[in-house]
Image: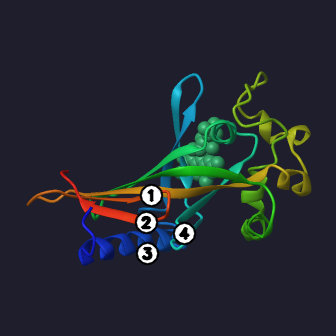
Amino acid sequence: MVDGDSKLEKLLQSTWTDLEKATGEPNHPCRLGQIATVHSERGVAVRTVVLRKVDRHGRRLWCFADSRSDKIHEIEADPRVAWLSYDSMMRVQLRLSGRASVVTEGDIVDTSWASLNDTQRDEFACAASPGTVLKEGWDRPETPPNRLSAAEARRWFCLIEIFVGRVDWLQLNPTGHLRARFKWDGAGDLHSAWVVP
Ligand SMILES: Cc1cc2nc3c(=O)[nH]c(=O)nc-3n(C[C@H](O)[C@H](O)[C@H](O)COP(=O)(O)O)c2cc1C
């Protein structure tokens, strides 16, 4: 552990700032992340999601999801997750890991649903669960019988909340790569260090 290293502290804070900015900037490089979950048969599963909300003090990230999707079942079975984003301009890879939970009700869900436009809400309006095999062809979800009302669609909307336990930051540099690791222990104390890239 390298306590009192102000560069490390600044780096961690600027990382949180980047994540916060990403929630409000559609083209921000951290706006899209890949969240990996533990899969009972395949071992791991990974997919792209949009970063929607960040709380640096609570060490939490949120994204939106359909509560019928595989990732939700995987998180409910095993909450361990990893999050990845890469900023190709800054050549920074960010890897976060921690424990996820599924939030289906409460202010944060109501506010988030209210923030969606009709097109975004419609993504939750398919009567069949994500991943369901379409026997009639690829475009059948667009047909009216398979669509739910907005109120029914709301039922499937949820948030994934990630409580971050570890941050691994890597920057590629022509003059030498830099890597830093931040870990919070069970008491919530932060352990920070520069590590070999
Ligand atoms: C650019 C992009 C952004 C996406 N954003 C989300 C998202 O915010 N939430 C989500 O549930 N799925 C999102 N998806 C779809 C997921 O990557 C995935 O295909 C879907 O959620 C089903 O994943 P699962 O079967 O592992 O649960 C996005 C896909 C792409 C390509």
Quadrant of the rendered image containing residue 52 = bottom right
Residue mark closest to the camera, 3 vs 4: 3
Work out whether mark 1 precedes mark 4 in sequence or the reverse, and give the earlier one: 4
The answer to whether residue 128 is left or right of residue 72 is right
Badge 1 vs badge 4, beta-carbon distance below 8 Å: no
User: In this figure, which residue is indicated by the disc labeled 1?
Assistant: 185
Work out whether mark 3 precedes mark 1 in sequence or the reverse, and give the earlier one: 3
Give the CA distance from mark 2 to mark 4: 26 Å
- Amino acid at dot 2: Asp
Residue mark closest to the camera, 3 vs 1: 1
In this rendered view, identify the residue nearer to me: 127 or 80: 80
The answer to whether residue 130 is left or right of residue 23 is right
In this rendered view, identify the residue nearer to me: 47 or 196: 196
Badge 2 vs badge 1, beta-carbon distance below 8 Å: yes
Work out whether mark 2 precedes mark 4 in sequence or the reverse, and give the earlier one: 4
Q: Secondary structure at mark 3?
A: helix
User: In this figure, which residue is indicated by the disc labeled 3?
Assistant: 17
Work out whether mark 2 precedes mark 3 in sequence or the reverse, and give the earlier one: 3
Residue 189 - label: 2
User: In this figure, which residue is indicated by the disc labeled 4?
Assistant: 23
Quadrant of the rendered image containing residue 23 = bottom right
